Image (spheres, helix red, strand yellow):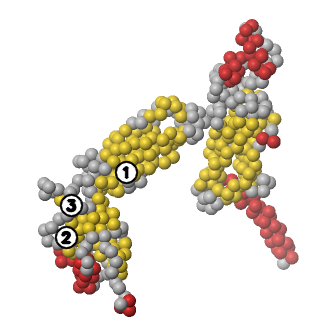
């Protein structure tokens, strides 16, 4: 008995020691460092072996306005994704090295809480007071900065170069003399992630559009990669959701240049052709449709909008599931571009199939040219509530019929509403 008890205690102690390690392992597997983006970059392309010995490149890094300079401020942004099903609290560290030596005064350490399936974007400013080759990397710690959960993998660090006066002097001397100068710095050029084009948002208004009404599209395209990209083309299409293979092109907008982290907004207007079927539509957007640009990720180039409803008559008031007071004001409003005469129908049949379960306003063969109707005093509540009592229903439905001068008619969708009766003790 004694030995069995001792073994159980030892085993449980081992498990207790392992639990924090296992928890941290699971936490780190759910975290991902998406990218490190710099506000100023300056590639030094000087040979396929990526080890340069070129005075020309050093001078270009000084003269190129896009390159970071001594005394500038470099902005660093990193994105940390939490792929777990629960929020996590982590410490984020952005490390700065120059010529292999860490500059602890320039690093960032801060604790963030990242929600489930969310991404935290961390921004850090570095004053470029040192010359040399800068290396930027990211570490993810536990919230107490005691254990490292995740490191920037080799090759994913970001580099840039700040030339010293000695570097510039040596480069000028070498260019003038054509002789290799001893003691000149040998610089490893920068490695850049390819560009990565993706749609940040696809917004289309209005969500319920009338035939002949303009759609307003706002499309935000982002370069989430690490290098510039030129001559970016996008294809904008629409389609009926019941016929997703029959897409029609709206526009082919383009952007000449997109820097890392830059967002380009395309603002477009479009009217769906008159011969389109009524119903639900979506806008599909594709960047680099011919796959001509080499990207970090190729599977995030397509996005879709919200569903857009196309109709001839749009119901405005009362909204669906609205409640009127029996002794209050009754007002019906709608909109249409294609029709000029209207009447509304109110009933207890949600499909308006039983002619004895609904009535017209105005009654008979009368039509109105307005796009709103205020029933006569006592007309609506009296007829509607009498119909509800006769059919033993407690809910009403309404729709609008439109008519053109040619005699062509169209029917709107259907909204529900209720009427709250006046209580017997209110009189």
Residue at position x 31%, y 70% in the image: 331
Residue at position x 35%, y 56% in the image: 208
**361 to 247, vertically: above or below:** below
**46 to 301, vertically: above or below:** above
| Badge 1: residue crowd in 10 Å (few <14, some 14–19, many ≥20) | many
Q: Which residue is mark 2?
A: 362
**239 to 87, vertically: above or below:** above
Name the image quarter holding residue 234. top left
Dividing the image into 4 quarters, which one contains the C terminus?
bottom left
Name the image quarter holding residue 143. bottom right
Q: Which residue is mark 3?
A: 369
Residue at position x 50%, y 39% in the image: 264
Please state which of the two labelled residues, at mark 1 or mark 2, is closer to the viewer: 2
User: Between residues 417 and 156, which one lies in front from this camera angle?
Assistant: 417
Q: Is residue 260 left or right of residue 247?
A: right
Q: Is residue 164 left or right of residue 273?
A: right
Q: Any mark on residue 282, and which?
A: 1
Q: Secondary structure at mark 3?
A: loop
| Badge 2: residue crowd in 10 Å (few <14, some 14–19, many ≥20) | some
Cβ–Cβ under 8 Å for marks 2 and 3: no
Q: How many marks?
A: 3
Name the image quarter holding residue 125. top right
**361 to 264, vertically: above or below:** below
Q: Does the rendering let one see residue 289?
A: no
User: Between residues 305 and 418, which one lies in front from this camera angle?
Assistant: 418
| Badge 3: residue crowd in 10 Å (few <14, some 14–19, many ≥20) | few
- Label 2 – label 3 distance at C-alpha: 11 Å
Q: Mark 2 or mark 3: name the one nearer the start of the chain.
A: 2
């Amino acid at each position: 008995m004694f030995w069995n008890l001792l073994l159980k205690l030892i085993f449980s102690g081992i498990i207790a020691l392992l639990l924090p390690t296992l928890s941290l392992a699971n936490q780190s597997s759910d975290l991902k460092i998406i990218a490190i983006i710099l506000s100023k970059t300056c590639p030094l392309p000087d040979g396929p072996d990526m080890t340069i010995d070129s005075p020309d490149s050093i001078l270009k890094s000084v003269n190129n306005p896009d390159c970071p300079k001594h005394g500038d401020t470099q902005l660093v942004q990193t994105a940390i994704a939490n792929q777990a099903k629960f929020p996590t609290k982590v410490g984020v560290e952005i490390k700065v090295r120059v010529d292999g030596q860490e500059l602890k005064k320039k690093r960032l350490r801060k604790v963030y809480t990242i929600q489930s399936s969310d991404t935290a974007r961390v921004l850090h400013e570095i004053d470029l007071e040192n010359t040399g080759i800068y290396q930027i990397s990211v570490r993810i710690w536990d919230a107490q900065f005691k254990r490292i959960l995740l490191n920037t993998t080799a090759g994913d660090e970001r580099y840039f170069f700040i030339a010293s006066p000695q570097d510039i002097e040596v480069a000028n001397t070498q260019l003038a003399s054509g002789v290799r100068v001893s003691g000149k710095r040998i610089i490893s050029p920068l490695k850049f992630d390819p560009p990565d084009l993706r749609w940040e948002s696809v917004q289309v208004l209005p969500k319920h559009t009338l035939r002949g009404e303009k759609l307003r599209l706002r499309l935000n395209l982002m370069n989430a990669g690490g290098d510039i990209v030129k001559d970016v083309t996008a294809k904008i299409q629409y389609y009926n959701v019941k016929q997703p293979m029959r897409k029609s092109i709206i526009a082919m907008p383009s952007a000449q240049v997109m820097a890392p982290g830059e967002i380009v907004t395309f603002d477009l207007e479009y009217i769906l052709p008159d011969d389109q079927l009524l119903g639900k539509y979506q806008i599909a957007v594709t960047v680099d449709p011919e796959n001509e640009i080499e990207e970090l990720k190729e599977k995030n180039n397509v996005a879709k909008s919200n569903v857009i409803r196309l109709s001839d008559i749009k119901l405005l008031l009362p909204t669906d599931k609205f409640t009127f007071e029996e002794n209050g004001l009754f007002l019906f409003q709608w909109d249409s571009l294609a029709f000029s005469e209207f009447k509304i129908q109110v009933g207890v049949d949600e499909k308006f199939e039983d002619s004895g379960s609904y009535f017209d306003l105005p009654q008979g063969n009368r039509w109105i040219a307005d796009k709103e109707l205020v029933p006569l005093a006592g007309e609506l509540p009296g007829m509607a509530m009498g119909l509800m009592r006769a059919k033993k229903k407690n809910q009403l439905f309404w729709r609008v019929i439109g008519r053109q001068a040619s005699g062509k008619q169209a029917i709107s969708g259907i909204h529900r509403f209720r009427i709250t009766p006046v209580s017997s003790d209110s009189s």
